[in-house]
Each structure stands twice: as C-alpha cells, then as structure tokens.
Image (cartoon, coloured by chain):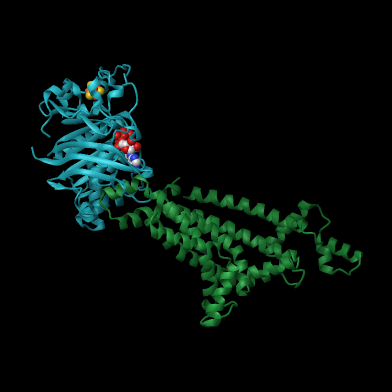
Amino acid sequence: MADVLEVRDLTIEFLIEERYYRAVQGVSFDIGEGETLGLVGESGCGKSVTSLAVMRLLPTHTKVSGQVKFRGQDLLKVGEPQMRQIRGNEISMIFQEPMTSLNPVHRIGTQISESLILHRNVSAAKARAQSIDLLKLVGIPRAEQIVDEYPHQLSGGMRQRVMIAMAMACQPSVLIADEPTTALDVTIQAQILDLMRHLTAENHMSTLLITHDLGVVAEMCDRVAVMYAGQIVEQGPVREIFRHPSHPYTVGLMNCIPKIAGERKRLVPIEGNVPSLQNMGVGCRFAPRCPKAMDVCHEEPEEYSVGTEHTCRCWLHAEAGVTSR
Amino acid sequence: MYAYLIRRISGAVVVLLGISIITFLLVYAVPADPARMIVGPKAPAAVVAAVRAQLGLNLPLPVQYIHYMDRLFHGDLGTSYIYSLPVAKMILQRIGPTAWLALWCWVAELVIGIPLGIYTARHARHKRDYIVSAVALVGISLPVFWLGLVLLYWFGFEIPILPLGGSGGIQYVILPAITYGITGAAYYTRLLKSSMLEVMGQDYVRTARAKGASERRVTWRHVVRNALLPVVTFGGIDIGYLLTGVVLIEATFNWNGLGMLAYTAIQNDDVPVIMGTVMLIAVGVVLFTLLVDIIYAAIDPRIRYE
Ligand SMILES: Nc1ncnc2c1ncn2[C@@H]1O[C@H](COP(=O)(O)OP(=O)(O)OP(=O)(O)O)[C@@H](O)[C@H]1O
Ligand code: SF4
Ligand SMILES: [Mg+2]
C-alpha cells in the first residue's frame, strides 16, 4: 500500500510570551491509499495542532519541524502559493465546529462553489450546479433551495453535511476530519459518520480522523494512533490495539468505554490531568498518572515494536527492541 | 424582514415622541421669558401679560404640549425672537448647505478611515501598523478649528487654489471635508481594525484558508464584509452626530448652514430657533439610526430573517 501522507518527526512549538513551548513532539505516522487513520487522545494533547500543521494553517510565529510528505513532496518546504493549490484541492479539512465554521454572510452555494472556482476554474453558474449535486451527495434534502440559504438557517447536522460537501468538492486524495461529530447529538453523529464512511470508501480517500471517542475509531478506522501530551504513545491496526492495548494510557482509555452497548456503565476515567505545555516534566509524560510507573520512567522511553505494525512508547515494552522508524 | 422593519420603525416613533417632549420643555429650561423676549425689555408688565396669554403660556402644560405638537405637524416651528421670521423657513434655507457639507465630511472620513483600517489590520503588530496608527491618532487629537485654519492658510492664501472659506459648490467643500476627515478618520480606522482582527480569528476564516483561498481573497471576501457590521452602525450614528459636529466646521469655514444658525441662536437666547434646530438634529440622528438598522439587515442575513 503506497503511503499518501507520511508524517515524520513532526515537532510544533508555539510562541507564548516570548518563549517557545513544544505542543507536539516527534510525531510520525503514515496514511496509505484509501486508509483511515484514527488519532485519539484527551483534550489538549495536540491532535488539532498536528492536523493544522499538515495543512500549514498554524499561526505565523509557530515553529514546525520534521517532514509532512504528501505523495513524496515535503509540504513543510513548499511555497505558500503551491500550498494553496493543495489546500481544499488535494487535502481537505472538516472542522469540529459546524456552527461557526461557515461564513455567516455568504450563501451555502457560494461557500461550496469557492473551492471549485479556486481549483477547477469553473464559471459561477457551473459551480452552483455542482454545489447542488454535492449537497445531494451529502444527503441534504431540498438541495436546490438550500444552495441559496445562509448557514444560520441550517441545523448543526446540516451544516456539518455542508462542510463535508465543501471538503469533497474537488475530490481530494486526503481528508482530515477534526472531531467532525463531537458537536452533534448522538443520532446525527451516527448519520454523519455513515456518510463519511461511504464517501471515503467510494472515492478511495485517505483519511485522518481525529476523535476522542474510541467507539468511533472501532467503527471507522483501519489503524489508530493514540496521542498523549504531544506524543504518539501507541500506534497500530485497530483490531490489534483493541485486543492487545499495550500502553498503560491506552489501557486506561479502553476502560473508559462502556463495554456493553446500551447499558450505562460507569466510566472509569484515568485519574489526574494532562501536563500543561509550560510544565512538561522529563521522562515519560504519562508517568505522573501511570499505575505502572517505575524508576526507569524518569527517562524518556522510545517507540518499541510490540507486534505487526504495532508500536508503543513505554518502558514496559523496551525488551522488544527499538522500532526501525 | 417586514416584522423587523415594523419593530424598528415603531421604536423610532416612540423615541421621536420623547424628543418632542424634551424639546418642548426646553422653553422652561431657559431663564428668558418668551413674552418678555418678544416685546422687549422696556415694555410694560401688562403688555407682557397680554402676550403671555396670547401665546397660551398660561394654559396647563399638557394642553400647551398638544398645541405645540399640532403646530409642529403643520410645519410651524414658531417665530424667531430676534429676526421675527418663521423658524421653519430659516431652517429650511440652511438644511441644504449643511446636508451637502455633512455628506462630504462623512465621505472624507470613510475614504481616509476605512482603507487605513484594512491596512493596519493586515499589518497588525508590525511597523507599518504602528506608524499608520500613530499618525491617525495625531489626526484625532488635532483641534478642528486649528487644522481648518492651517489648511485655509496654506491652500487658500499661500497657494491660493481654493476659496478662503464661505459656502458654495465643491471647491468650497474640499477644505472643510478634509479637515473633518482627518480629525474623524481614526475612529473608523480603529474600529475597523479591531473588528477585522476579531473576524480574522473566526473559524470560518480558517475554513476559507483551508479551501486554498489566498490572503487577499480571505481579507476581501471573508473578513472585510463581516468586519464592516460595527462600522456601519458607527457610520450611521456618526452621520447623525455630524449634523451637530458640523457646527464647529461651519464656524471655522464661515459656512452658512444650520450649525451657524444654532450657534448664533444660542448666543442670542433665541429659544424658538434653538428648539427648531435641536428638534431637527434629533430627528436626523433617529432617522439615520433607523437607516443603519435597515442597511445592517441588508448586510447580515441573520438579522433579516430573525
Ligand atoms: N495558537 C496556539 N498558541 C499557543 N498554544 C496553542 C495554540 N494552539 C494550540 N495550543 C496548545 O497546544 C496544545 C494542543 O492543542 P490542540 O488544540 O491540538 O489539542 P486537541 O488535542 O485538539 O484537543 P481537543 O480535543 O480539545 O480539540 C494545547 O495545550 C493548546 O493549548
Ligand atoms: S514508561 Fe513508565 S510511566 Fe510511562 S507509561 Fe510506561 S510504565 Fe507508565
Ligand atoms: Mg482539537
């Protein structure tokens, strides 16, 4: 499987009050043709920031190092005009906040048309016709009317469908979806996920699906990367990780999902808080919350192989040897 | 949209009624006795009393107010104490020149202020922003009066390409408008800049970038239009105030408009003229605020369909 997106050693530092703080450190992952990679982790662990780095949409003054290779080309090195050709065209993004991610003063059709006009060089009339088709594609009823309506006239679920239509407009090869359903209620969530699964499969898109819901991962993803405090702590095929979670943090996350569908079991959240950017300690970042912490955990663990394509950043698995990455 | 309009218009009517009451009470806020003002300081007390009765000043206040409103609706704003001319006529003659001047003053503010606002927002926290903002701030703090005289000296006297004050066509308008523009533009610059910076942080701007839009396109299509909303509000209120602010400009440039009329009326205790001009300016402010609401609805669909 050819990798469409290869992220290597991605490190992101924000300038806060004249000092740089590392929000993401040494993140590496690959997404193959038509593959869906889930990126999970608690709030603030750096999921959104990672995806924005791929799109090169982080604020200026942010230090980004490493490589983000799209079909072999390092996006961190291309010029801004060339990057604009890629955004919305080759790589599209869906955001978490459907309520605020659409421009309130432009009609739905105008907003979907924008990518088409930018990348496909089509006339406004043609873009409008295609926008209607896209609205139909994402299951919006009365597409002919909705195309002329404004965002505030639509519900959250409908707006997220519009966002998806917008992202699909130029048939990108990579789709980044940053918690696309978090802001929606449960029944709508299922519908949107269904829609995304269909569209990505039909168009053979590679997808980076950001979520903090392991249930969504189980349903949607081929592989999953678990992030903690700016690092990927465990990565591998979904089945593998659900069967043999190796990192104590992943184990903790698994315990948070209610086991039996329908029954409201008490969630067992992992105790403690994520360390803040300003006081990231040395050694394993999970150590303060880890039930299995040992002396050696004062030093930073590397990524060790624990199975086929399955890696884990934890001293418990050090004997397996450092991965080849 | 209609429901919205009806709500706004009925609101404006209530405000206008309030204004009429306040203006009506103005007579009692001024120490001068109207009857005495009319007949002059030497007339006997009996004459003053007769005039008072004739003016209806002995009637109960509410009755007087009804009479006042009745006259108002018939276009009768009273008679000037000093010139013995109908106030309505005096005002009517000056509305044209003042509106003409005010319009250009406003245009000058926008023409100077809005581009600077966009410029400073696009270069926020860089040297160019600091320089332009500092210059705009100097403009705001210049006294109209002083700046006007300096401009008159240079462009009316040293390099005599423009008339040395007076009212008339476009050549008379240029200097007062530039003066007003320079001293007022900074409000628009600052307002638009902060509004643009706020909009630039919005999720939908990120969405536009994610679609591959250029910075220029993001600024013009996604940021400016949203950022103009507060500027439109301010602009409408400002044009209302301009009707009052124009007093200073008119005095500086010897422009024969409403401002001059009000200015001399205040000096002469000419109450009917004061009442008339105050009423007119208040009505102007209310109408422009109403106009703003309507323009606002045209720009922002969320309001239109509310
Ligand atoms: N522009 C920024 N400047 C400074 N710090 C930032 C900036 N953006 C994000 N951060 C910090 O980077 C860290 C990672 O943030 P990020 O938004 O990626 O988290 P996340 O995993 O997406 O969380 P969530 O699940 O809440 O969306 C956080 O500590 C956040 O405060
Ligand atoms: S390295 Fe140590 S502290 Fe970190 S997760 Fe593994 S056992 Fe826990
Ligand atoms: Mg996020």
Percent across and percent down for residue A299 are 23, 27
Q: Please state, as top left, top right, bottom left or bottom right, where the C terminus of chain B lies in the image.
A: top left
In the displayed structure image, the side of residue B223 where residue A221 appears, left or right: left
Front-lying residue, B265 or B69: B265
Front-lying residue, A82 or B168: A82
Percent across and percent down for residue B245 are 60, 64
Percent across and percent down for residue B230 are 47, 53
In the displayed structure image, the side of residue A119 where residue B116 appears, left or right: right
| Figure check: B157 above or below A230 | below
Q: How many marks?
A: 0
Q: Colour of chain B?
A: green
Answer yes or no: is residue A165 visible. no
Answer yes or no: is residue A191 visible. yes
In the displayed structure image, the side of residue A267 where residue A86 appears, left or right: left
Q: Colour of chain A?
A: cyan
Q: Quadrant of residue A6?
A: top left
Ligand 2 quadrant in view: top left
Q: Residue at x 57, y 58 (%)?
A: B287
Front-lying residue, A114 or A23: A23
Percent across and percent down for residue B224 are 39, 56
Q: Quadrant of residue B50?
A: bottom right
Q: Residue at x 23, y 58 (%)?
A: A123
Q: Quadrant of residue A8?
A: top left
| Figure check: B245 above or below B223 | below
